[in-house]
Amino acid sequence: MADTGKRQRVDQDGADVPAAPKISVQEAMPQYYAKLFPCQHLAKWLAYGNDSKHAQADAHFFNRREFCFTLPGDIFVRYQAFKDAAALQEAIQRRCPAKIDIGPVYSASPADRHKFGAAFQPVERELVFDIDLTDYDDVRTCGSGGHICARCWPLMAVAVKIIDQGLREEFGFQHILWVYSGRRGVHCWVCDPSARQLPDEARGAIANWFAVYKGHEEGKAKIGLVGTTKHPAVERAAGILREAWVETILPAQRLLEDGPACEALLRYLPDEGLVAAVREQWKKDSRKRNMTADVNISRWRSLEAVVKAKIGEEKKSKGAANYKALAPLERCLDEIVLAHAYPRLDMEVSKKMNHLLKAPFCVHPATGKVCVPLEPPAVDAFDPDAVPTVGSLLGELQAAAAAREAEGGDAKPPSEPWRETAMAEAVASFERCLLAGLAGANREELAQRTRVAVAVGQMGVDF
Amino acid sequence: MEAHKLRNPNKEDSELLVKLNALKAKHMKGALVPSSASASTKEEEARADLISHYVLRLAYCRTAELRKWFLAQECEMFRLKFSKYEAAEHEAFLAVHAPQYKAVDSAEFESVRDDVYKVMHSCLESKDIIQRTMAAPHFYKVAWTRVPELVSQRRVLLRRGFAYVSREALAPLVVAEFRASVSKGLSDMARRWRQMFPAEEEQRLQPLVASLANRSLVADYSGVATKYGDVSAASLQQLSARHFPLCMGHLMTQLHAEKHLRHGGRQQLGLFLKGIGLPMEEALLFWRSEFAPRTPNDQFDKQYAYNIRHNYGREGKRTDYTAHKCTTIVCFSGGPGDHHGCPYRRLDETQLRQALGRLKCEDRKIEEAVAKAREGHYQLACASAFEGIHRVPEMDVGVSAPLQYYTESRRIHAEREATAAQGAGAAAAGAGAGAAAGTGPGAAGAGAGGSGAGDAAMEAAPAGGATPGAPTPPQRGLKRGPEGAPLGSTPGAGR
């Protein structure tokens, strides 16, 4: 409800937000689920066209999907399954979960899992990614743990761009939904039919493909760079990062101002002499520094210049064959950038088909923020402090009702009350990012099933 | 005799091949083929290979767990053999078994040429190979899902879901096909086994098949728990200081200092504690008291107790999980707040020196351990530390599991106490320590195919299988589940 960042809002149209009523998130949830939660849209997505009248539509498809409710007091209720959107809506309103997770589609309805024993297996599941700012604690200077602010959001923004582009251009996926996770991170759902059917091994492979950052070792981030040439995929990511590094990340995180972050950063330089040279140059700069320029940027430019000068020197003195000394030098600038800003995935989430992930449009129980979709092209402008909260939305509902009252009270509220709130924009974004594209893919998937059925029929195989 | 050819999963590639041949020679009744092998002996060998493959298929088809393990081992074997093929053999093999891979024509190749070149460069291929490949490019375009291994290591160019694979990088592709077909074969076999075998073959095949899967050449530390009696929560701190390897001692220290451990650390330490005989109730008590007061009781019950019970096989899937081996732990990576994994790999040198100093390791051995860790020999570094801390001479095999370290430490300690109790002089004590170092690593090092006691254990295993039909008792105290499936030594734990 802090309105400081309202200028940058992407999920609201900039209209004045009425003061939110002061009730706790938990108290607000029954109303949220009754009036604001876009359950129909969620169900439409997860049915993947199987809710249609098409001859090949599998009417039991939705019913085989696992939902997990987290009830107040951290009680997990797993293996919930619902036959359609109405049943889902009814259960959500009745139990009022603090969190809703989406699991895989199983070979049978999760309600009947005991009947099937070992034959009860996950068969289909979106490919998902989870990126949390907590994993960046060693490289962000603005806060740690559950903290998130406009200064660390650029880290998430580049992560979204890099993974999104990789998924589209390298893996050929098209139906990708990004969601703000309500507190300190983002979730990604890849919904292409081919992505949903990936076995665990392939999921692990994708996760590894993106895992350039490989955890911490000896107090430094481990970056899998070797030699002097980068893989085209890594080069693409590095390109995005180099630009964001000087434009947003460096000024926002102030990594090069004197302090532990700066010391840690200098440790990526391959030798002590170089570090000393960089410090010397910085000292020189500070004497003639023009006070308007950002010190982080000017220091970075000096650091780059010193490293490049050193590379030139090495090449001249010992020739290009001096590979042992040259390779670490040529790598170190990119290594710094990648170590501080390359996306840090929670790998385990992506690797297994049956990992649960929080559904879009949930409300984070601690912050009250709604998990709204993110659109990669606009991700830089996204302000995590300005997303609609359950409180702000309920306030807008009240305001809309009051406005109708003032106009004479004749107009009826819309059948879906959220259309009068900022939720409308979030749902529209969900439709743009995902549902619109999926419609075609769903039709194609059903048509493919028809073709298979016909082929089987022609072969005269009798099941 | 066929059963034992692929039970040694913790080796480097080249070493593995040699090892396999040695094992084969040993267990296949001297089928060591002389270098002047004629065509008929080769055929004979292929036949034996085929028979053994199918016998094992039968033995390992019964549960998902067994199938998964067997599949992994067979694929590894296949990969090794395939990598020894020559170019012509590759081509012939592809034409027969995998005609679905379409070659990339030259026009299309030109469009990706630069990127392909960069990929090869980034993988540090040698100049020769790059030149050879680029001079006469034979590339195949396949869906990326067919080459998960290459994707996983970023050793391939991806464009819109398709991977550009050179003929040289074919192996994973073919291994994937092989895996799929064996996997399918296994599940078919499992179905048929369930449908028809038990009734007819109850007396003859059933016991043999059931016992085959339970043999193991790899040392099994599940007996550790009982040997030195149960461990209680109260004694853990003391045991930790004396007997725990650094990976576990480090976790104990961090846990104590921070009153918390993240998931990876809880898993690594918890399963180890279970392995040394900490009963579940004591484990709950231990974690609860360590987490207090940062984590209040009821929050502990909600967030952590389930997982502890799960590790003990009392919740959810009810699998009796075993402690991680070094190979697993070394591969763990984690963020800045994580303390699990192998400390010889994860700590920097100063931290490592301090940690070993606290354990009163000899200075000379500390330096030795740090040097080995720097070279990437983490398990040898651990062995050096062991020698330095326990003041014993060379322990020539590396440490292969935290439980092994613990067992060795307990044994040396017990022996020293015994000799001290006998009132023997200083000379006797020295001899005791010497003997300990001599036999200890051998006994524990059976997994690495060590000498002495290790071999004796290996020989003991095949003895039962030599008489088909005679139901063999489970080997060496492996715990058995309701269907005779091994619970204690989870197949595939090595990989």
Image (spheres, helix red, strand yellow):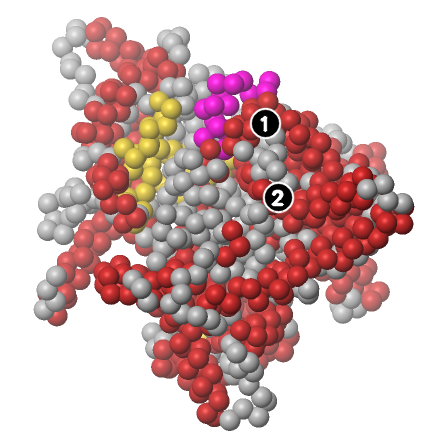
Q: Is residue A85 above or below residue B453?
A: above
Residue B297 lies within the magenta run: yes
Give residue A79's position: percent from left, percent from top: 30, 35
Quarter of image, res A128? top left
Q: Is residue B389 above or below residue A418?
A: below
Q: Residue at x 48, y 38 (%)?
A: B311
Q: Nearer the viewer, residue A367 or B269?
A: B269
Quarter of image, res B319? top left
Q: In this image, A188 relative to A234: left or right? A: left
Amino acid type indicated by mark 2: Lys
Q: Residue at x 58, y 38 (%)?
A: B277
Q: Which residue is mark 1?
A: B286
Q: Secondary structure at mark 1?
A: helix
Q: Magenta segment, which residues?
A: B292-308
Residue B227 — which label? 2
Determine the CA span between mark 2 and mark 1. Answer: 21 Å
Give residue A78's position: percent from left, percent from top: 33, 32
Question: How would you rate the neighbour count of disc 1 (Cα within 10 Å): few for under 14, some for 14-19, many for 20 or more?
Answer: some
Amino acid type indicated by mark 1: Phe
Q: Chain of mark 2?
A: B
Give residue A408's position: percent from left, percent from top: 17, 6
Q: Secondary structure at mark 2?
A: helix
